[in-house]
């Protein structure tokens, strides 16, 4: 952005712009910018449409800028270093656990059903012997 345009832009907008478009060495907004970057990654991963994502990130940058102006500091957030293979393995393990849980539930239901069937058969057998 040319210096002339930047001078005409309100200071609040400049701070938000610095948060959204972090430049290495801009220590004042480094932590806030990392929060925006981490949020952007999470929203992308969740499949949030670009327009909604941009709106959310703009609001977040505005809130962070207000906090910075009020003297708050933010620690730098880091994205987890997870490979696609690790993500796939975690998903596979989660699905296996869900399958195991479903099988345990089904076995319990079958046991309850079998117990009720046996009880009913005993009652019928008692009714025939009277």
Image (cartoon, rainbow, N blue to C red):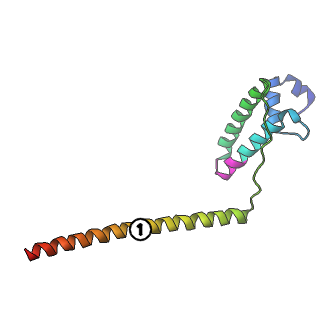
Q: Does the magenta stretch include residue 112?
A: no
Which residue: 41% across, 68% down? 106
- Residue 2 visible in rendering: yes
Q: Position of residue 83 (x, y in %)?
A: 75, 62
Residue found farthest to the left: 130
Q: Position of residue 76 (x, y in %)?
A: 80, 41
Q: Name the residue under label 1.
A: 106
Which residue: 65% across, 63% down? 90
Tell me which segment is drawn in magenta: 41-48
Location of residue 16 (image quadrant): top right
Say left or right for 130 vs 89. Answer: left
Which residue: 66% across, 66% down? 89
- Residue 20 visible in rendering: no
Q: Is residue 43 magenta?
A: yes
Which residue: 10% across, 76% down? 128
**Dot 1: few (<14), some (14–19), or many (≥20) neighbours within 10 Å?**
few
Say left or right for 109 vs 84. Answer: left
Quarter occupied by the N terminus:
top right
Location of residue 126 (image quadrant): bottom left
Q: In what element is the residue under mark 1?
A: helix
Quarter occupied by the C terminus:
bottom left
Say left or right for 38 vs 25. Answer: left
């Amino acid at each position: 952005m040319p210096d002339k345009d930047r001078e005409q832009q309100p200071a609040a907008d400049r701070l938000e712009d610095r948060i959204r478009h972090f430049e290495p060495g801009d220590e004042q907004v480094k932590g806030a910018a990392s929060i925006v970057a981490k949020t952007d990654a999470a929203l992308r991963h969740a499949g949030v449409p670009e327009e909604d994502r941009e709106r959310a990130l703009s609001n977040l940058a505005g809130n962070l800028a207000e906090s910075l102006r009020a003297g708050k500091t933010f620690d730098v957030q880091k994205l987890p270093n997870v490979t696609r293979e690790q993500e796939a393995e975690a998903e596979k393990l989660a699905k296996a656990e869900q399958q195991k849980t479903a099988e345990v539930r089904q076995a319990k239901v079958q046991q309850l059903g079998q117990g009720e069937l046996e009880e009913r058969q005993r009652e019928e057998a008692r009714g025939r012997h009277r």
